[in-house]
Amino acid sequence: MNNTPSLHPASAAAQPNPGKTPSRRVTDAPTRMFHWLFALCFVGAYATADGEHWRLLHVTLGYTMAGLLGFRVLYGIFGPRTSGLGLLWRKLAGAPAWLRALPQAASVTQINWRQGQNLLMALAVVLLLALVAPLTLSGYATYNDWGSALGGDWMEEVHEFFGNALLVVVLAHVALIAGLSVLRRKNQALPMLTGRVEGNGPDLAPKNRAWLAALLLIAALAFGVWQWQQSPNGWIASGTPGERQQQRDDD
């Protein structure tokens, strides 16, 4: 007779898996999809900023960034608490108290460095979102030659200023992630890929909402295809600069 005890299916499911590290979800799929689409659009837009040959692709990526910003604002208002914009403001609201506590600390070890790191991270995210609106508006004005109505290329310079300002914030954000990864000896960018961090406890983002992330990706790709179809030459312009200018005027 087999005396080996058998586990009820419910009991077996409750047993921990020794080969799997426990983790919990901290970021849902729509937030992660927005992050990486936004990053790719900015890199592509910045790389094509100086070439008239790639002008339509540059404009398409810029408009996509504006659309992504609109999605992020709406999702931050109507989405789950973990993706809410209020969470960023609450972190930034603690900055005055943290700064006042610095001179009162008896030693460096008594400073709440983790709160300071979270403040810098929240500040970088807020600046990234805040710079997109003037960057897109100045880019739209430049593309439609609004600046020439008042004389000079000042609108193009404004657009370039905001583009470089956004680049500085992006590089600072990446440097902060890299620095924290070294200090904490853990890849701080990984949760924005997987949505999870190691450790026990409940998921901070209970629902992943992969369907919404898929819709966001489809919308971004559909807009790119639509822009490509609207242009006789696709995303890559051809002809002389004067001919391309005439083509924009005809459009």
Image (cartoon, rainbow, N blue to C red):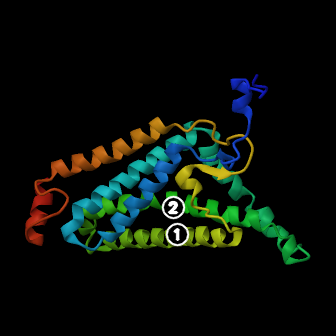
Q: Secondary structure at mark 2?
A: helix
Q: Secondary structure at mark 1?
A: helix
Query: Dot 1: few (<14), some (14–19), or many (≥20) neighbours within 10 Å?
Result: some
Mark 2 and 1 residues: CB-CB less than 8 Å, in contact?
Answer: yes
Q: Residue at x 50, y 44 (%)?
A: 30
- Residue linked to disc 2: 128
Question: Residue furthest toward the front?
Answer: 1
Q: Viewer-proximal residue, 69 or 235?
A: 235
Q: Is residue 248 left or right of residue 63?
A: left
What percent of the width, then of the height, locates residue 61?
32, 57
Q: Viewer-proximal residue, 161 or 50?
A: 50
What amino acid is found at the position of numbered circle 2 in the picture? Leu
Between disc 2 and disc 1, whose residue precedes?
2
Residue 102 seen from this side: yes
Q: Residue at x 34, y 64 (%)?
A: 44
Q: Viewer-proximal residue, 188 or 1?
A: 1
What amino acid is found at the position of numbered circle 1 in the picture? Val
What percent of the width, then of the height, locates residue 194?
55, 51
- Residue linked to disc 1: 169
What percent of the width, then of the height, locates residue 239?
8, 68
Give the CA separation, mark 2 to mark 1: 7 Å
Q: Is residue 201 left or right of residue 46?
A: right
Residue 73 seen from this side: no
Q: Is residue 13 left or right of residue 47?
A: right
